[in-house]
Amino acid sequence: MLETRLERGISKQMENQQQAAQQGVALPMIVLILATFMSVLDTTIINVSIPKMMSVFGVGTSDIQWVVTAYSLVVGALVPITGYLGDNFGYKRIFVYSVILFTIGSALCGMAWNNNAMIIFRILQAIGGGAIMPVAMAMMFRLFPPERRGLSMGIFGIAIMFAPAFGPTLGGYITEYLDWRLIFYINVPIGILDTLLALMVLQEFKQDEKKRFDFFGFLTSSAGFASLLYGLGIVGDKGWTDIEVIFYISVGLCCLVLFVLIEFIVEHPMIDLRVMKNSMFTISLVISSIASIALFASLFLLPVFLQNISGLSAVETGLVLLPQGIAAGIMMPISGMLFDKFGVKWLAITGLTITAYSFYLIQSLDIATSFSTVSWWLIIRAIGIGSVMMPVSTAGMNTVPMQNLGQASALTNTVRQVSSAFGIAWLSNLLSERQFYHVTINSEQMPVGGYAVTSALSQLSQFYSSGGLTGNLANSAATSWLMSQLQKVSTVQAMDDVFWVVTWVVIVAIVFAFFLKDTKAPRGEKPVIME
C-alpha cells in the first residue's frame, strides 16, 4: 500500500513537472515562431508589389530585380555563419539582434525614396531576416527533449509552410487596396513586440568552449553561396549556357569546394561537415531538399498560370493559393504528433506518396481547369509535404549531438535554400524549353494555309470588323489573338511536362525514405525551462 502511494506521488510529481515544462516553453516558442513567420513571409509578400515599385521609382526590370536578388544573396551568404555566432555569442543575443535589424530594415524599406535606397535597406533587412530561422530552429531543439520535438517542430513548421502561401495574398491585397509601403511597415510593430518578449522570456544558450573564427571558411562559403544563388537566379532569363550563368555558377562551385576542404583541415570549422557522416542526417537533407523543390515548383508555376493564362489579379490568385497554406498549417502539428508516436519512416513514405499523387493530378492541368480544382490539388499537395518537411528534418536533427545543433541547423537551412533556388532555376528553364517545343509542334499541326486556321481567322476578322476595325486591322487583331491562344495552350502543356518531371523527382525521394530509421529518441536530454 505504501509503495503504491509512493508510486502515485512520484507519478503525480512527474506530471506536474511536465505541465510546468510545457507552460515554461509555450511563450518562448511563440516568440520564435512569430519572428520566423515574419521573416519567411517577407520572402514572398514583396513579389506582387514589384510592378508598383517599378512605377514609383521609375526603373526597369533589370534594376528592380535587385530588390529581391540582394535579399536572397545576403541571406544565402549569412546563414552558414549563424551556428558559429550562436555558439560563441549566445543564441538569444543573436536572435534579438537579428529581429532588431530586421525591424529597422523593414522600417527603412518602407521609407525608401528610390531604388538604390531600397536595395541598401533590403540588405540590412536580410542581415537580420537571414539569421532568424536557423537561430530560432536551433533554440527550438534546445527547448524540448528529442521525444517531444515532433509536435513542437510541427508547430514551428507552420511558419515555414504557411507564410510563403499567405504572402502573395496579403501582399496583393495591400498593394491593390492600401499602400504598398505597408508591406514593410507591418513588420515594425510585430518586430518591436517580439523583441520585448524575447528579452523577457528567452533564456540564453551558448557553448562553454569559445571557437576561433574560421575566416577563410566564412570567406569561401559566403562567396560560394552568393555566387551560386545569383547564377541560379538568372538561369530562368538567360538559360544554362549563358556565359554569365556559367561564370557565377562555376565561381560558386569552386568556392564551395575550397570551403569543404578548409572545413576538414581547420581545427575549429565554421560548419562541422563531419555531421554529414551521420547517414540519418544526410538522408534527411536529401529528402528535405527534394520536398523544397516540390514546394516551390507549384508556388512558382501556378501563379503564372492563374495570372498570365487565366487573367486573375494578384489578390484573386492569392485567394486560390491560400487554402493550401491553411491545409499545410493544420497538417504540420498533426504530422508532428504522428512523428512523436510512430516515428518518421512510414510517415515520410506516406506523405511523399501523397505529394507525388498530387503532382500527378496537377500535370493534367489545362486552360479549362476550374480554380476550385486547382485549389483542391494544392490542398492534397500541402497535406503530403506537410507530412514530410518537419518530421524528416526533426528526425535528422535528433541524431546530431547537442553541441552541434546550431551548425546542423545552419547547414539544414542553407541546403534548403540552395535546393529551392536550384529547383526554381531548373524548372523555369525546363518550362522555357518545353514551351518552345510545344509552340513548334502546335504550329506544325496548325499550318497557316490550313482550312481550320483560315476559317478561324475569317470568323475572327468578321468579329473585329463588326466592332469597327477596318479590314487590315481586323485581320491583324485576329492573327494576334490566335497566336496568343497558341502561346497559352503551349505554356500550359509545358507546365504539365514540368509537373510530370516533379512527380518522378518526388518518387526518387520515396526511395530515399525507405532508408530512414525509426530509432528511439534518447530520453536523457532534458528541456530547458524558461524562467
Image (cartoon, grey):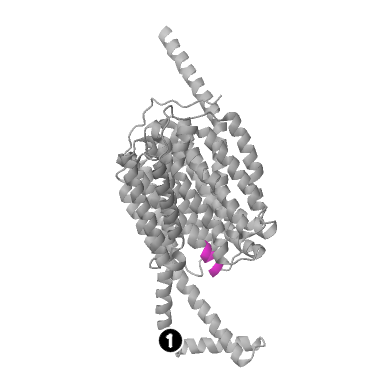
Find residue 254 and report its horizontal and vertical position in percent.
Answer: 35, 54
- In this view, 484 is above or below 101: below
Tell me where residue 404 sits by quadrant: top left
The amino acid type of the residue labelled 1 equals Pro
Dot 1 falls on a residue whose secondary structure is loop
Toward the top, the furthest residue is: 2
Q: Decide: few, some or many residues near mark 1? Use Cα within 10 Å; few <14, some 14-19, many ≥20.
A: few
Q: Is residue 196 left or right of residue 142?
A: right
The stretch drawn in magenta includes residue 307: yes
Q: Is residue 382 left or right of residue 50?
A: left
Tell me where residue 47 sits by quadrant: bottom right
Toward the right, the furthest residue is: 178
Find residue 132 and report its horizontal and vertical position in percent.
Answer: 52, 42
Find residue 56 and report its horizontal and vertical position in percent.
Answer: 67, 63
The stretch drawn in magenta includes residue 219: no
Q: Nearer the viewer, residue 314 or 135?
A: 135
Find residue 52 and report its horizontal and vertical position in percent.
Answer: 64, 62
The tally of labels here is 1
Q: What residue appears at the point 56 percent right and 51 percent down from the top-left corner?
A: 123
The answer to whether residue 301 of the structure is visible from this angle is yes
* Mark 1, residue position: 447
The answer to whether residue 358 of the structure is visible from this angle is no
Q: Quadrant of the C terminus?
A: top right
Q: Nearer the viewer, residue 430 or 130?
A: 130
- In this view, 512 is above or below 154: below
- Magenta-drawn segment: 303-309
Q: Is residue 304 left or right of residue 54?
A: left
Majority SS type along the magenta span: helix
Q: What residue appears at the point 67 percent right and 57 percent down from the top-left corner?
A: 113
Q: Quadrant of the N terminus?
A: top left
